[in-house]
Image (cartoon, rainbow, N blue to C red):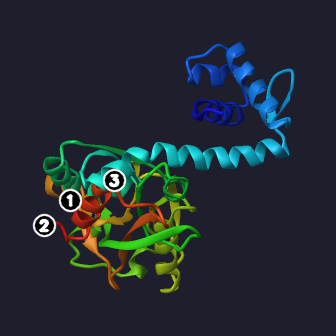
Amino acid sequence: MHIETLKIFCDVVETASFSKAGSLNSMTQSAVSQQILSLEKKLGRTLLERGRRQCCVTPEGAVLLEASKEILEIYNGLDERFNELADVVAGELSIAAVFSIGLHDLPPYLKKFQRQYPTVDVQVNYKRSAQVYAQVLSGEAAVGLVAYPAQRKGIHIEPFMDDEMVLICPPSHAFASLEKIAPAALKKERFIAFDPDLPTRQIVDRHFRESGINLGHAMEFDNIETVKRTVEIEQGVSIVPMASVKTEVKAGVLTAIPLDPPLRRPIGILLKRNRPRTPALREFLALLQGKAE
């Protein structure tokens, strides 16, 4: 049984297609079919139920799928382990981050890290919060960055930083001259919000409920850039991390006003429990936490 065969099997299950699995592995559909048949013969089990248009995994196939993923994860991590033995800061470093953190908080750290370790191939994936947890847990990402980190099975959390949350409005808005703003002032405002399933939205809503205020959500978006642009064109006001609007405030296209009482957004570093820390990952974490030499 070869590693390549296990990967082909996983691809067939995940795509529910022999032809798509063939494309992923530069093989013909017939060659993929022969690989699966050979695997079934070797194990003495039917792994896939073949249909006219697609296939689905059998209970025995589901067991093999889980085991195959574990084997492939170990195999794909061998280079990292070899580098760890040699204590060489090299190889790949995959990072998953929510949009606001990946675009605004992370870049200075990435630039410094890549200057220090140019042999590390850093890959950043910008995802929604739930996807970041999933990528770290599956091993697809070595490290994740999310706001308001929550305990999840198999995930270890370390602190990164806190963002100050601020109200943003156009410079022409009546709020623009204020030094700080209380929740009651937003009662009649058109509020540009994040989608309801995003942690930052949930915390902002709770912050106002605790003050007895229900915000009128005029629009909802799933990313911070759209929220900012919507406020810029005078469609409403919003609450975002200060780090995400420094450029716009400096350019004079947005005004940022501190909240009273203040609201802060903690950012956490997500790591998969018991995953070996390669030299590249160790140095990156040290940089994020101010421990780098």
Q: Quadrant of residue 259?
A: bottom left
User: Residue beneath label 1, please?
Assistant: 246
Residue 135, percent from left and from top? 51, 52
Residue 293, numbered label: 2
Camera-side residue: 101 or 246?
101
Identify the residue position indicated by label 3 in the image.
102
Q: Name the amino acid type tagged 3.
A: Gly
Q: Which x, y percent locates residue 224? A: 39, 54
Asked if the residue under mark 2 is in contact with the one under mark 3, i.e. CB atoms within 8 Å, the reply is no
In the depicted structure, whether residue 18 falls above or below residue 277 = above
Please give the count of numbered marks on the rendered protein. 3
Mark 3 against mark 2, which lies toward the viewer?
2
Query: In the drawing, does residue 56 fall left or right of residue 95?
Result: right
Q: Secondary structure at mark 1?
A: helix
Quadrant containing the N terminus in the rendered view: top right
Horizontal side of 191 relative to 177 (left or right) equals right
- State the CA–CA distance, disc 1 to disc 2: 28 Å
**N-terminal label among 1 and 3:** 3
Could you say which quadrant of the image residue 266 lies in? bottom left
> Which of the pair 241/109 is nearer the observer?
109
Of circles 1 and 2, the one toward us is 2
Q: Amino acid at mark 1?
A: Lys
